[in-house]
């Protein structure tokens, strides 16, 4: 009886831990292309290198497509500009 309670507690702790990990991933800063949780000039450079590309092209960078419309253009740049300096 007691071991079932402990097992249930362990499962609960595991699920809480997973929820925290998932939560931290989804809390990624908008405009952060490099994945360092900051929006800096490095993100602008990555966006600029991929600018004008579409899905499948050689300079395509999925991370730079911030609005997920399949093309890297000024709309993605605006998102970087709006969040520039966040997380620094
Ligand atoms: Ca960044
Ligand atoms: Ca886009």
Image (cartoon, rainbow, N blue to C red):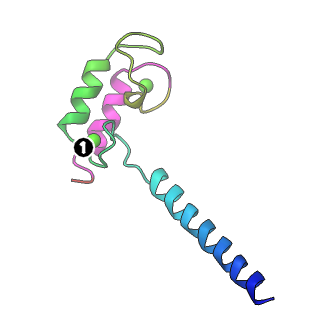
Give percent across and percent down for residue 6: 69, 83
- Quadrant where ligand 2 appears: top left
* Residue at image coords 48%, 15%: 55
Q: Classify mark 1: residues with Cα within 10 Å, few (<14), some (14-19) or many (20+).
A: some
- For image coordinates 39% across by 17% down, the residue present is 60
**Residue found farthest to the front:** 3
74 or 65: nearer the eye?
65
Q: Is residue 56 left or right of residue 53?
A: right
Which residue is depicted at the point 75% across and 89% down? 2
What is the total number of numbered labels drawn onto the structure image?
1
Question: Does residue 7 sit above or below 64 in this rendering?
Answer: below
- In what element is the residue under mark 1? loop
Query: Could you say which is closer to the camera, residue 77 or residue 4?
Result: 4
Q: Is residue 44 left or right of residue 7?
A: left
* Residue placed furthest toward the right: 1
> Considering depth in this image, is 86 or 56 the residue closer to the camera?
56
Image position of 55 (left or right of 18): left
Q: Is residue 57 magenta?
A: no
Question: Which quadrant is the N terminus positioned in?
Answer: bottom right
Residue 69 placement (x, y as % from top left): 50, 24
Pinpoint residue 63: horizontal percent, then vertical percent. 40, 31
Residue 45 higher or lower than 17, as above or below: above
Give the residue at the far top of this rendering. 57
First to last magenta residue range: 69-86
Could you tell me which residue is drawn at 29 percent across and 26 percent down?
Answer: 47
Q: Residue furthest left?
A: 41
- Reading the image, the residue beneath label 1 is 84
């Amino acid at each position: 009886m007691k071991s079932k309670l402990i097992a249930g507690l362990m499962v609960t702790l595991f699920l809480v831990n997973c929820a925290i990990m998932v939560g931290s991933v989804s809390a990624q800063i908008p405009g952060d292309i490099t994945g360092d949780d900051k929006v800096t000039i490095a993100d602008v450079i990555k966006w600029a290198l991929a600018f004008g590309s579409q899905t499948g092209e050689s300079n395509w960078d999925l991370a730079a497509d911030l609005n997920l419309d399949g093309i890297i253009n000024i709309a993605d740049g605006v998102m970087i500009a709006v969040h520039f300096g966040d997380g620094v």
